[in-house]
Image: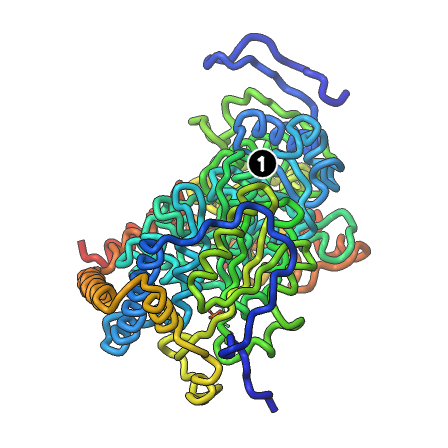
Amino acid sequence: MSSAILEGGAGMADGTPRRGVEQLSMQQALNRALDEVLAGNPKSLVFGEDCGRLGGVFRITDGLQAKYGPGRVFDTPLAESGILGMSVGLAMAGFHPIPEVQFDGFAYPAINQIVCQIARMNYRSRGTMPMPITLRVPSFGGIRAPEHHGESLEALFAHVPGLKVVSPSNPHEAYHLLKYAATRPDPVIFMEPKSRYWQKGEVDFDSADPSGSPAGGPPTGAKVMREGRHLTLVAWGAMVARCLQVAELAAEDGIDVEVLDLRWLKPIDEAALAASVRKTRRAVVVHEAPRTSGLGAEVAQLITQSCFDTLKAPVERITGFDVPYPSGDLEDEYIPNIDRILFGIQRVLEYRRG
Amino acid sequence: MDSTPSAGNDAGQLPEPLSGLLSGQPAGPLTAGQLRELYSLMVAVRHLDTSAIAWQRQGLIPGYAPELGQEAAQVGSGYAVDTARDFVFPTYREMGVARAMGVDMVAYMSTHKATWHGGLYDPLESRLAPIQAVVAGSVLHAVGWAHGQTLDQTDGVAMAYFGDGASSQGDVHEAMNFAAVMRAPVVFFVQNNGWAISVPTERQVAGGSVAARAAGYGIPALRIDGNDVVAVVDATRRAFAHARAGHGPVLIEAMTYRRGPHSTSDDPGRYRSLNEERDDAGEDPLERFRKTLLADGVADEAFFAEALAAAKAEEEHIRAGIQALGSRPGTEMFDLVFQETTPALQAQAANWREESEHV
Ligand SMILES: Cc1ncc(C[n+]2csc(CCOP(=O)(O)OP(=O)(O)O)c2C)c(N)n1
């Protein structure tokens, strides 16, 4: 029942036609978002390795070259620094590049261009040369891919002044976050959880509230994916779905878990984080990146800063280990699994001041 | 044991001929007025360059990357740029290019005053990208900008400067390949000044020359006498015409010589003797041009004296401008990171104001 319109009808208040709700995979939702960005902004360009005729190895750019032509959607030579360095020049020339690196591990050869050039050009040029570049990075593990095809680079990117970092957790988020990111005047690293590419979910195209906040507006902050009273699980990307599963299991034991999808890893929505933890008074951060100097440390510090007086226990981190991302057979040991997250919850709930 | 460096353009050694064919109209000869203008530019650049080293010694600026001996390569190539439609991507050593393009020199020098990375000139208006410290960092930017002109169907050409040392960077090779595959209108302008800090060209560039590599990408290359300003103007104009006509990128390797130190903190005595420097550098490009103009009756001593006086006046004006340059307000540190700032950055800025500005 893919792409079937389940709901629809009258136009929106601003006159745009309602498009309703569809069941889509994240891959389809991202493809739809790119399609609409290309249609809406003639200066937007989609390119990378195999993005054209093939539609990308994950098919995120499927059909776009046929629709927009090889000038707007194209294959580049196989060189990541080239792709990102060329993006800088295109942005200088007034374009809105949406490059792809094929897999997270291959962002490393482009780090020089990302960190020294893309992230700094607005600053270096005193605001005259903005870098409206949306770098799509198929990210994280969970698909038993070969070495370098599953990495969690969020802390590395978030640490770089001048970059913004976002990761969607489901098709609805993927659609809205990509549409938003790809229209911003600043560089955004868009980390797609590749293990979720084929998961379906409802995409509400007309959502008046992609913001995740009651006030509405653009999707600029974190989003409560499940309300709870006893503890906040903070996650992003592929870990959000796992945390929602954990919350269901915990509920069977009478533990009411709130799940906060951070969505933006830079800037982090500190207000949403504080609001959730001030309510639940306990927090566990879950990420699959290695622990040391990971984003979990940043999140824990932000929580300590804003909620120290109300916290019932130290913030717990359930993370990957400080080891190279292991091969497929050991992935399930490395990526936080349901048991490890449940143990973490238990430790926080049972914490007693010494 | 290193062999004796014989890099640069030995006197009497002619550059290799053209490799590859250039299409497009060769430019007509330069008029007497243009030749005199080129000389005036070279004198201005020579004078400013020499002064900048003195300024560093006097403590007016913390550091500078001199270009003594590269005036012909820089002025000649910069002179060929059409600032109405082209765009130039410099390194940290392109003062002469900037001057030839008419960039505000106080704003240019502000980088060396440590006022602002990239300089204070407006890159969009001047058509000169911000000063770049990562060698080869901006070569790919030139390719992207140039490809943008193709997509926009304009006839703008990008020119990327880099050195023989930078030619070892992977980005240069990615850039040449991208530009050739996409037929991007780019002029790769290599100033082979014989040295990358302490390493001579023959210990840097395998295959004999940077120009030789272009052939591997199907890019026509010119290896020219970079100390002959007229030859540089001519080659750059031909390269621009070729790229502008839609024939794709061109590489120019201008053989020149960096006299003196790599930067004001370099000690060239550790890697070459003054005698070697004198032997390898060949004739001073400024003196050489002066002799030609005199012999051809294009300019006389009175003109040279006038040009020097103008250069001195200009230098004094620039020095005064630099002296007057204050620091940028600290708020800019926070304001110019993003187009759309973040709450964390705003909070840090507010904190900084409270604790540092004492307001
Ligand atoms: C990527 C990078 N590595 C190292 C340096 C330090 N560095 C600055 S200039 C230089 C030598 C560059 O030589 P070349 O490209 O020939 O240019 P030249 O300085 O001779 O004009 C080096 C090693 C740098 N700026 N960038």
- The answer to whether residue B92 of the structure is visible from this angle is no
Q: Position of residue B222 (x, y in %)?
A: 57, 60
Write down the residue under mark 1.
A45
Q: Position of residue B357 (x, y in %)?
A: 21, 57
Can you name the residue that lies furthest to the bottom here? B1
Q: Position of residue A300 (x, y in %)?
A: 49, 54
Q: Is residue B24 above or below residue B214?
A: above
Q: Residue at x 60, y 51 (%)?
A: B22
Q: Residue at x 48, y 67 (%)?
A: B226
Q: Is residue A28 above or below residue B173?
A: above
Q: Position of residue A259 (x, y in %)?
A: 57, 39
**SS for callout 1:** strand
Q: Hey, what amino acid is under mark 1?
A: Leu
A92 relative to A245 in the view: left or right:
left
What colouring style does the render use?
rainbow
Q: Residue at x 28, y 58 (%)?
A: B105
A63 relative to A207 in the view: left or right:
right
Q: Residue at x 57, y 65 (%)?
A: B167
Q: Nearer the viewer, residue A273 or A182?
A: A182
Q: Nearer the viewer, residue B339 or B299?
A: B299
Assess disc 1: are there few (<14), some (14-19) or many (≥20) residues with their C-alpha within 10 Å of its C-alpha. many
- The answer to whether residue A142 of the structure is visible from this angle is yes
Q: Nearer the viewer, residue B197 or A279?
A: B197
Q: Is residue B304 above or below residue B77?
A: below
Quarter of the picture holding the N terminus of chain A? top right
Can you name the residue that lies furthest to the top here? A10
